Image: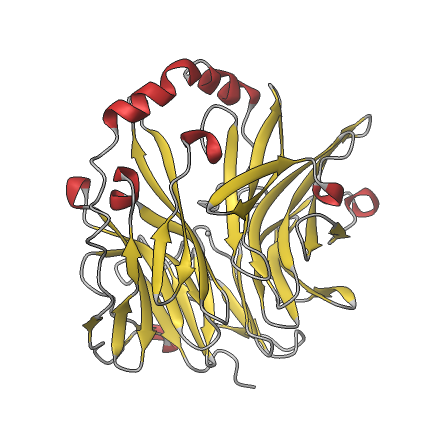
């Protein structure tokens, strides 16, 4: 999803932002949009009856979205497609959260409490099977046009903004947010500057509507000359799962390795190396994760190739998708998994997408547009989101047929 931007920032950027810290709070107060009236939340109602999907080349169909919607995240509560983002611009901007039901799209009731919440786009979203929701909104503002994060939580009946102080997720020490989880424990994962030249994994836990940050937590923390940076978050019934990279710098040089971490309580963490760069000499990265009740599928890259892994109670299994070229360090492959089917998209500047029901036999299904930023599997139907394309949401029913 930081905005799926939880990757390495340079020390120069941290130092440059630090010079703004003396005036950021005052500027934020002075330039914040007027807050929305608390007594007038947006109602939940059917936005429109969705027209029949329009056929596209290659077996895909274009899915109509409500007018003005700029989608950012496509996910599922297990049975329905859920899309978040924003609509409008300037003072007319507003956050949007929608369900796709049998009769069409429905708006989930959102209650903003601050000026930035009123104009935010919901750029991070997690929905549990019981309907509980955690989301993060983002708007640009203040004298320095810095990202203003807003925190939201609730259910698919109503989601409320929970006001936070500016430095909760932002400010000169912020390193980016990787994603959120709504169950088994509400979670925000990102990175934070723990020294003028180093970012470390950061974990936020909700406590009475306030998000509290910790760094250097268990096996999720940096280890000596190893710098860990998270990239994406998802959850099973029992665990929050985070994927990303560990960068090692020593006498042999610098190398990067894909890794996953798992926790049930945000206190104790298990670490799962996905590759062994020390033995192979090839760098790797994990960029996305999608989970079902019993396990997760991780998307990433190993050298110049698309890669995938399955993580469950038994450990890590390397998937073997057909050769798909990606650009190391730059590529952002995406994953979807529903417990019986897996789909992997190359993501950046690529139309390549492959799917499998057993991790052995794969089908290649190039998407109609490149830059796929999210995938979701709902009732066997595969949805691919490319927000900047002329048809931002496309789908097909046969992705996982044998």
Q: State the residue lying farthest toward the left.
A: 92
Residue 313 x, y percent position in the rendering:
75, 68
Instruction: Work out whether 145 lies above or below 289.
Output: above
Residue 183 x, y percent position in the rendering:
56, 61
- Colour mapping: secondary structure
Camera-side residue of 23 and 311:
23
Q: Is residue 306 visible?
A: no
Camera-side residue of 275 and 23:
23
Residue 230 x, y percent position in the rendering:
60, 44
Instruction: Quadrant for the C terminus, please.
Output: bottom right
Instruction: Work out whether 294 lies above or below 301.
Output: below
In the displayed structure image, the side of residue 373 where residue 9 appears, left or right: right
Residue 266 x, y percent position in the rendering:
66, 49
Residue at point 38% right, 61% down? 385
Q: Residue 71: which quarter of the image?
A: bottom left
Residue at point 52% right, 85% down? 401
Instruction: Work out whether 196 lies above or below 282.
Output: above
In the displayed structure image, the side of residue 205 where residue 95 appears, left or right: left
Q: Is residue 90 visible?
A: yes
Camera-side residue of 257 and 191:
191
Instruction: Work out whether 193 lies above or below 215.
Output: above
Residue at point 79% right, 49% down? 276
């Amino acid at each position: 999803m930081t905005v799926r931007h939880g990757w390495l920032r340079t020390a120069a950027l941290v130092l440059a932002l630090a010079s703004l810290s003396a005036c950021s709070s005052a500027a934020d107060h002075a330039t914040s949009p007027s807050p929305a009236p608390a007594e007038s939340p947006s109602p939940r109602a059917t936005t429109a009856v969705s027209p029949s999907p329009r056929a596209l080349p290659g077996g895909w169909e274009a899915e109509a979205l409500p007018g003005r919607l700029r989608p950012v995240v496509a996910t599922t509560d297990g049975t329905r497609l859920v899309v978040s983002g924003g609509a409008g611009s300037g003072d007319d901007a507003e956050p949007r959260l929608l369900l796709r039901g049998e009769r069409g799209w429905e708006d989930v009731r959102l209650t903003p409490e601050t000026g930035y919440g009123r104009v935010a786009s919901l750029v991070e979203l997690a929905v549990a099977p019981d309907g509980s929701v955690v989301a993060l909104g983002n708007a640009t503002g203040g004298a320095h046009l810095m990202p203003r994060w807003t925190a939201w939580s609730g259910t698919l009946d109503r989601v409320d903004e929970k006001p936070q102080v500016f430095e909760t997720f932002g400010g000169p020490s912020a390193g980016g947010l990787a994603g959120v989880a709504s169950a088994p424990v509400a979670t925000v994962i990102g990175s934070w500057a723990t020294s003028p030249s180093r970012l470390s994994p950061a974990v936020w836990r909700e406590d009475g509507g306030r998000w509290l940050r910790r760094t250097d937590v268990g096996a999720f923390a940096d280890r000596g000359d190893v710098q860990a940076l998270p990239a994406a978050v998802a959850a099973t019934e029992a665990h929050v799962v985070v994927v990303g990279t560990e960068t090692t710098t020593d006498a042999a040089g610098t190398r990067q390795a894909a890794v996953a971490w798992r926790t049930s309580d945000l206190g104790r963490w298990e670490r799962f190396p996905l590759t062994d760069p020390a033995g192979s000499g090839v760098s790797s990265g994990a960029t996305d994760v999608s989970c079902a009740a019993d396990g997760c599928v991780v998307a990433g890259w190993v050298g110049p190739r698309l890669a995938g892994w399955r993580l469950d109670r038994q450990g890590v299994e390397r998937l073997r998708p057909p050769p798909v070229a990606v650009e190391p360090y730059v590529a952002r492959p995406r994953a979807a998994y529903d417990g019986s089917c897996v789909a992997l998209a190359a993501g950046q500047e690529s139309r390549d997408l492959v799917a499998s029901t057993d991790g052995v036999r794969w089908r290649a299904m190039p998407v109609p547009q490149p830059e796929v930023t999210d995938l979701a599997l709902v009732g066997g139907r595969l949805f691919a989101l490319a927000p900047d394309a002329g048809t931002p949401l496309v789908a097909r029913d046969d992705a996982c047929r044998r």
